[in-house]
Image: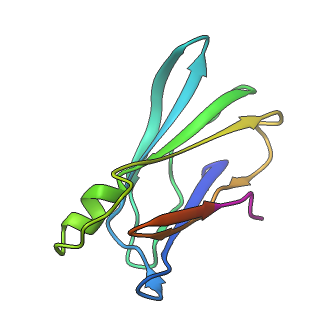
Amino acid sequence: MSPITTHVLDTARGRPAAGVEVTLERGSGDDWSPVGGGRTDEGGRLGDLGSVAEPGRYRLRFDSGGYFAADGTPAFFPEVVVQFTVERPEEHHHVPLLLSPFGYSTYRGG
């Protein structure tokens, strides 16, 4: 398992959000570089986002617009970006996203 994982739940539909494109990026100054990514599975999970070798700023970019557009649902937020700090790369960092067409919420999970 990657040290950074995510789980996307579609709260409007009451089910996991399958097929959401997610990109993990690492920050350096004002620049961001991709280090991993993929699509959520049928359970809304993405457990292999790439490796995190060192402490620093990271962010997850969720293509929420593409997810909702796939079935013709209009969405206010075309993308959700969640930034966070990794202090201990050896620890697991689970960053879930609760998503609807007009809102979202996130937290550090276990």
Q: Is residue 68 magenta?
A: no
Q: Is residue 43 left or right of residue 39?
A: right
Q: Does the magenta stretch mainly form a helix, a strand or a loop? A: loop
Q: Is residue 106 left or right of residue 35?
A: right
Where residue 32 appears, as percent x and y from the top left, is 49, 21
Q: Nearer the viewer, residue 9 or 53?
A: 9
The residue positioned farthest toward the top in the image shown: 29
**Which residue shows up at 36% across the image and 72% down it?**
18
Q: In the rendered view, would you say 107 is above or below 18?
A: above
- The number of numbered badges drawn on the structure is 0
Q: Is residue 71 left or right of residue 92?
A: left
Where residue 103 appears, as percent x and y from the top left, is 50, 65
Q: Quadrant of the C terminus?
A: bottom right
Where residue 36 appears, as percent x and y from the top left, is 45, 39
Q: Which of the 4 image quadrants contains residue 104? A: bottom right
Q: Which of the 4 image quadrants contains residue 43? A: bottom left
Q: In the rendered view, would you say 65 is above or below 43?
A: above
Q: In the rendered view, would you say 82 is above or below 107?
A: above
**Which residue shows up at 39% across the image and 70% down it?**
41
**Which residue shows up at 60% across the image and 50% down it?**
2
**Which residue shows up at 18% across the image and 75% down it?**
71
Colouring: rainbow
Q: Nearer the viewer, residue 93 or 65?
A: 65
Q: Is residue 96 visible?
A: no
Q: Which residues are magenta?
A: 106-110
Q: Is residue 28 visible?
A: yes
Q: Quadrant of the N terminus?
A: bottom right
Q: Nearer the viewer, residue 104 or 83?
A: 104
Q: Is residue 1 left or right of residue 100?
A: right
